[in-house]
Image (cartoon, helix red, strand yellow):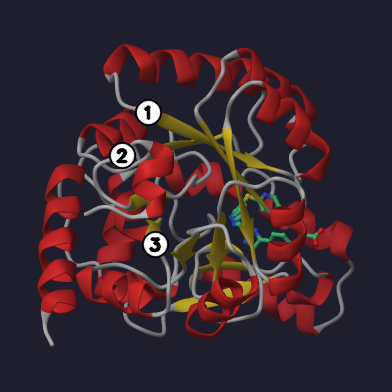
Amino acid sequence: MKTRITELLQIETPIIQGGMAWVAEHNLAAAVSDAGGLGIIGAANAPADWVRGEIRKARERTDKPIGVNVMLLSPYADEVAKVLAEEKVPVITTGAGNPGKYMELWKAAGSKVIPVVASVALARMMERGGADAVIAEGTESGGHIGSATTMTLVPQVVDAVKVPVIAAGGIGDGRGMAAAFMLGAEAVQLGTRFVVAKESICHPNYKERIIKAKDIDSAVTGRSHGHPIRQLRNQMTKDYIQKEQEGVPFEELELLTVGSLRNAVVDGDVKHGTVMAGQIAGLVKKEQACKEIIEEMMEEATALMQRK
Ligand code: TUI
C-alpha cells in the first residue's frame, strides 16, 4: 500500500511501531522494519550512549530504515538529539513536548522529523517549523496522553495541516487501521500490540497482563499534576489514584513511580509496577511475530477499504 508516508519514509507498509520506554529497543525495531513497517527505538529516559548503541545494533540487524523517538521530558533529551544528528537517523519522532529547538539540527542531518501532537494547535506549529509529517495521538494510547480522542483529533489535524498525518491511539488491528484511513490518516502507529510481539523483550508477565486485559482495564494516573499516564489497573494505580484524591503533593506521588516501569517491563512485577498500555489492550489476544501482525493487519485493512 502506497501513501505519502510510505514514500516519505521509504517503507512498504504504512504501519509504525511506537517508541515505548524499555520495550522499543533494537530487537523489536529491527523486526518491525524487516517486516516492512517502521521500527522505532524509544529513547525514553535513557542516556544518549544507550541510544547510540541501540541504533548501531539495529543497523547490524537490518538494512531497512529505523526511527528513534525522543521523549522530550527526558533529562538526556539534548544529548540524545545530538547523537541522532551524528548518526544521521533517517526518521525522528518526538513525544511529550515541543521539539522546535531541535528541528534545524535534525533537518540539517537529513532526518525526517515527525512530532507526536495531541492538538491541532501543536500540529500547525510543527508544520510551520518544518515537520515532515505529524502523528496525531489520541487519549486511548498507553503512557503519556493528551485529552482528545483519536476519532476527534485525527480528522481535525488532517484538515489543519498539509503534511501527512499518522494516526495513533486505540488502533490494534486492520479495522482500526481502516477507520484511521477513513479519517484521513496515511499511516498508523501501534504500541500495545507490538509490546506483545514475539520479538518484544518485554517480560512475559507484562505480555500476559495485556492479553488478559478487558476493555475497561486501564486507568489514568497523574491527572492531578498534569502528567496523565494511561496504564493497566493494579495495586499501583489503586494506591496512586487514592493518594491523588487525598491531595498528596506531586513530589510524594513521584516517589511511588520511581523505577516502576522498569520493574514491570524487565522484572515482571505487574502488581506494583507501571503497566503502560492503551485502551485497545482488550483486543490483543495473543503473542505474534511482527511480520504476522503486519501481514494480518494489512490484509484486514485492505479488504475493508476495498469494500464499497
Ligand atoms: O510520549 C508519549 N507517550 C509516553 S512518554 C512516556 S515516558 C514518560 N516519562 C516521564 C514522564 C512522562 C512520560 C510514556 N508514554 N506519547 C506522545 C505524546 N505526546 N502523547 C501526548 C503528547 C503531547 C502532549 C502535549 C505532545 C505535546 C504536547 O504539548 C506540548 C507543548 O509544549 O505544547
Give the spatial CA distance, label 2 vs label 3: 13 Å
Ligand 1 in which quarter: bottom right
Asked if the residue under mark 1 is in contact with the one under mark 2, i.e. CB atoms within 8 Å, the reply is yes
Dot 3 corresponds to which residue? 186
- Say which amino acid is labelled 3: Glu
Counting residues from the N terminus, which is met first, the one under dot 2 or under dot 3? Answer: 2
Q: Quadrant of the C terminus?
A: bottom left
Residue at point 44% right, 45% down? 265
Q: What residue appears at the point 78 percent right and 62 percent down from the top-left corner? A: 253
What residue is drawn where x is 50% and y is 68%?
A: 141
Mark 2 element type: loop
Residue 131 position, x and y percent, is 65, 47
Q: Are marks 2 and 3 in contact (CB under 8 Å)?
A: no
Identify residue for label 2: 11
- Locate residue 170: give its quadrant: bottom left
- Residue 30 coordinates in the image, percent (x, y): 31, 29
Amino acid on which the number 1 mark rests in the picture: Pro
User: Residue 154 versus residue 41: which sits nearer the camera?
Assistant: 154
Q: Residues within 10 Å of mark 1 (few under 14, many from 20)?
A: many
In the rendered structure, the answer to whether residue 220 lies left or right of residue 265 reads right
Kind of residue at badge 2 = Ile
